[in-house]
Amino acid sequence: MKVRTLYSEKDIAERVKQLGEMISRDYQGKSLTVIALLNGALPFTADLIRHISIPVYLDSFASSSYVNDSSSKELTVRSRLKEPITGKHILLVDDILDTGHSLAACVEYFRKMEPASIKTCVFLDKELNISKPVKADYIGCKVENLYVVGYGLDSHELYRNLPFVGVVEND
Ligand code: IMP
Ligand code: MG
């Protein structure tokens, strides 16, 4: 198996730095609770927070989402946050926005906890011909409708450790 590179380690580093700087400007004078959506967002979140210059509280959240028979989304929560987020500025970080169902379900879940604000940041936004239930406030890069791996993204739990994003190809 070979992985064809779409975004190199250097491309990723440059873009993540820009995102961190943008977030720091937008939240100037405030502090921010960054919640990494496990496991995919781990490498991205680790890089992103090192480019955020305002005070950051780091947390993580494990969940999975699926669309039930009546086409509404259900969230299976597999972890708890360390601290209550009521009245806090929240940034949810994920690896990729595909259909958007998982992120929409997470936003809905956290909104019930009445944070001061809630925004979302994804490294990749997949270009699909559908309207998504949520838009990300911060997007690293657009990617065409392909199954991508690396930089946190897996295929059957493999490839998350690749420092670049690519597509698996047969030799
Ligand atoms: P969504 O709910 O359809 O937006 O799916 C989001 C989740 O599916 C992401 O957080 C990823 O974990 C996973 N996912 C979607 N597309 C890909 C892909 O191309 N490669 C790896 N994982 C993906
Ligand atoms: Mg995910």
Image: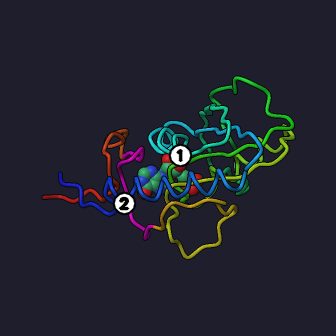
Q: CA distance from mark 2 to mark 1?
A: 15 Å
Q: Residue at x 73, y 54 (%)?
A: 72
User: Could you tell me residue 115's position as x and y percent?
Assistant: 83, 41
Q: Are marks 2 and 1 in contact (CB under 8 Å)?
A: no
Reply yes or no: does residue 99 show up in magenta. no
- Upstream in the sequence, badge 2 or badge 1? 2
Picture quarter containing residue 159? top left
Amino acid type of the residue tagged 1 in the rendering:
His
How many marks the image carries: the answer is 2
Reply yes or no: does residue 144 show up in magenta. yes
**Magenta region, mostly helix, strand or loop?**
loop
The residue under label 1 is 51
Foreground: 131 or 24?
24
Left or right relative to 121: residue 45: left
Give the colour scheme shown: rainbow
Picture quarter containing residue 112? top right
User: Could you tell me residue 56's position as x and y percent?
Assistant: 66, 36
Q: Residue at x 73, y 50 (%)?
A: 27
Left or right relative to 101: residue 144: left
Mark 2 Cβ inside 8 Å of ligand 1? no
Q: Secondary structure at mark 2?
A: helix
Q: Closer to the camera: disc 2 or disc 1? A: 1
The residue under label 2 is 11
Query: For mark 2, does the 10 Å Cα neighbourhood hold few (<14), some (14 to 19), or many (20 or more) residues?
Result: few
**Looking at the picture, does residue 130 appear above or below residue 24?**
below
Disc sitting over residue 145 in the figure:
none
Foreground: 58 or 84?
58
Q: Which residues are magenta?
A: 143-154
As drawn, the residue found furthest toward the bottom would be: 129
